[in-house]
Image: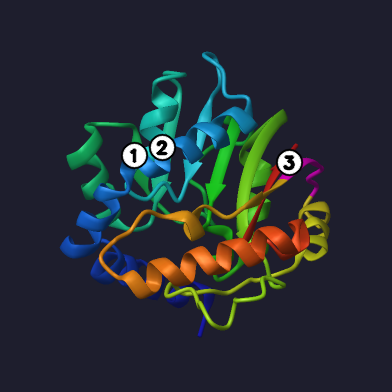
Amino acid sequence: MSASHQTEDGAAFYDERYYAPEERRRRAARERYMQRFIDQWLAALDLRHDSRYLDLSCGDMQMLAAAADITPHTRGLDFSLAALMAGRERYGPLAVVPGDAQRLPFADDSFDRLSCIGSLEHYPDASAALGEIRRALAPGGRVLFTVPNARWPFLRLWPDPQPLHTVRDRDGWRQLFREHGFQVISEFAENHSLTRPYEGSLLRWLARRAFHLVTIAAGLHRSWQFGFVCE
């Protein structure tokens, strides 16, 4: 299957399942919980009032809305029309465009801050997306990626329901970024999904807590995901 067909299938997945009404209700319920992580991610990017910011695969726009409180120069892009509709219903008329991260509709050097949160691994052609990010990022700009860890101990027990194309360990991700001209300037463990509040299933909540305790004890190399800030 070509990358373009995989992209179309991915968009259909998000439209039909990820942003179905029941899932949108769950995401709205965890909005306050997610906000503290979003604040940390924007701080890691060193987002400023004059920053030109793109949230790539912006989903339901919670992070884009938080960024808009810091800088007026924000844009969001997502290939799921259902996600963009959900975001506009919740956060109002933010500057977003439907589009494909592997073919960005922006000129060279358009942004000096960019985020790609939990999305790079889902692109059928991660290399194409990284090339586009490199092109759209101005010299001296920063980009934040959060990506899954192939060495997370519970990866097979807790599979990602979304289409997944690229999973690497810490060194593998760093190498991929270097191959596309990025320099990692900071990194951190990213385990926010493991500490979500109770959402109706006691078994899932207890499993998440147990996974979190083991993950923290195992150290950075075994974290659920990594955050990488690159230039």
Residue 187 in the image: above or below residue 173: above
As helix, strand or loop, the secondary structure at mark 3 comes to strand
Looking at this view, is 56 or 61 the one in front?
61
Quick check: marks 1 and 2 in contact, CB under 8 Å?
yes
Q: Which amino acid, by three-letter code, is at mark 3? A: Cys
Q: Which residue is mark 1?
A: 32
Q: Earlier in the sequence, mark 1 or mark 3?
A: 1
- Image quadrant where one finds the C terminus: top right
Toward the top, the furthest residue is 49
In the rendered image, residue 185 lying in the magenta stretch gets the answer: yes
Looking at the image, which is closer to me, 9 or 47?
A: 47
Residue corresponding to mark 3: 230
Q: CA distance from mark 1 to mark 2?
A: 5 Å
| Residue at image location 55% in from the left, 31% down from the top | 42
Distance between the alpha carbons at the discs numbered 1 and 3: 27 Å
Count the labels in the image: 3
Q: Is residue 126 visible?
A: no
> Which portion, as a residue range, is magenta?
181-187
